[in-house]
Amino acid sequence: MGRIIAIANQKGGVGKTTTCISLGVGLARKKKRVLLIDFDPQGNSTQSLGYNPDMLEVTVSDVLDRVIEKDYTIANDYGIIHSQEGIDILPANIELATMEMKLLAVYIGREKILDKYIQMISDNYDYILLDCKPSLDIITLNALTAADSVLIPVQAQFYSVKGLEQLLNTINQVVTGGLNTRLTIEGILLTLANPQTNNFKEIKKVVEGAYGQHINVYHTHIPRAVTAEEAPASGKSIYLYDGTGKVAAAYEQFTQEFIKEA
């Protein structure tokens, strides 16, 4: 059974999707079988890997619909795209936004719809990465209920760090409330960093001081770079778009650290 990791932060613009794709491709480059589930109605992971969300016949919404209808005859490759970068992706589009109302209408087990699907296909992968939307609702709760652990990208700035507490409280409620007692925190990854500044050094010190005793704070940090902002529009990961740049090097180092600590 593959490890299921939710990449989550309720704050947008922290490099969540870039981290999800870069870790996925980094793991695939190390011969791991990886599925990325785009679980954000904006479809950012889908677009960032070169696919038009509005042109796809099957997305994660269709998969969830079939599970809600108790159709468990879903083929292992139903809706899954085999990308040129070595990872599989279950795409998303704006239809996922309407899924919240459908999930809320499920009387029993609304938080476990995604989990039921993942249990059907998890043996096909070493890692399943869930790119969560930047909010804490029933969609994200489905991801947290299905996951083994949560990877938290945090932009190296004061307000991003301050917002960590809400996500950590939600994770704690998922565990203590019995929705997913196996859920742990994979670690905190500092992103969009400028390591030469005093601000970054102070933020790093605050994060390690506040959380480092109980939560893994990765030694690797991801620097800010124009190429990382340009890569999604090109439909390529940072490895294809700027493979010799500092962001690709940082994600390669992070992937090695991630595997070593797994």
Image (tube, rainbow, N blue to C red):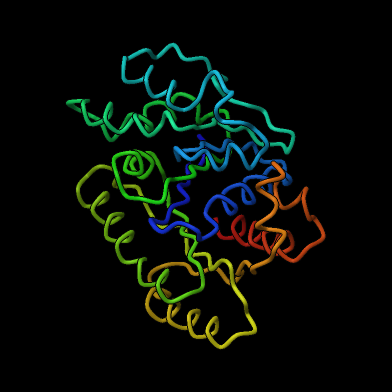
Residue at the image point whose x is 33% and y is 41% from the top: 145
Residue at the image point whose x is 55% and y is 21% from the top: 79
Residue at the image point whose x is 36% and y is 45% from the top: 144
Q: Quadrant of the C terminus?
A: bottom right
Residue at the image point whose x is 77% and y is 50% from the top: 241
Furthest-left residue in this view: 107
In-image side of 90 versus 135 (left or right): right
Decide: is 114 above or below 130.
above
Decide: is 190 above or below 72.
below
Across the whole image, how many numbered discs are drawn on residues? 0
Decide: is 56 above or below 5.
above
In-image side of 165 versus 221 (left or right): left
Furthest-bottom residue in this view: 198
Rendering coords of residue 142 (x, y %): 34, 38
**Which quadrant of the view contains residue 67?**
top left
In-image side of 24 versus 143 (left or right): right
Furthest-right residue in this view: 244
Rendering coords of residue 38 (x, y %): 51, 37
Rendering coords of residue 94 (x, y %): 45, 32
Residue nearest the observer in this picture, 206 or 56: 56
Rendering coords of residue 17 (x, y %): 55, 50
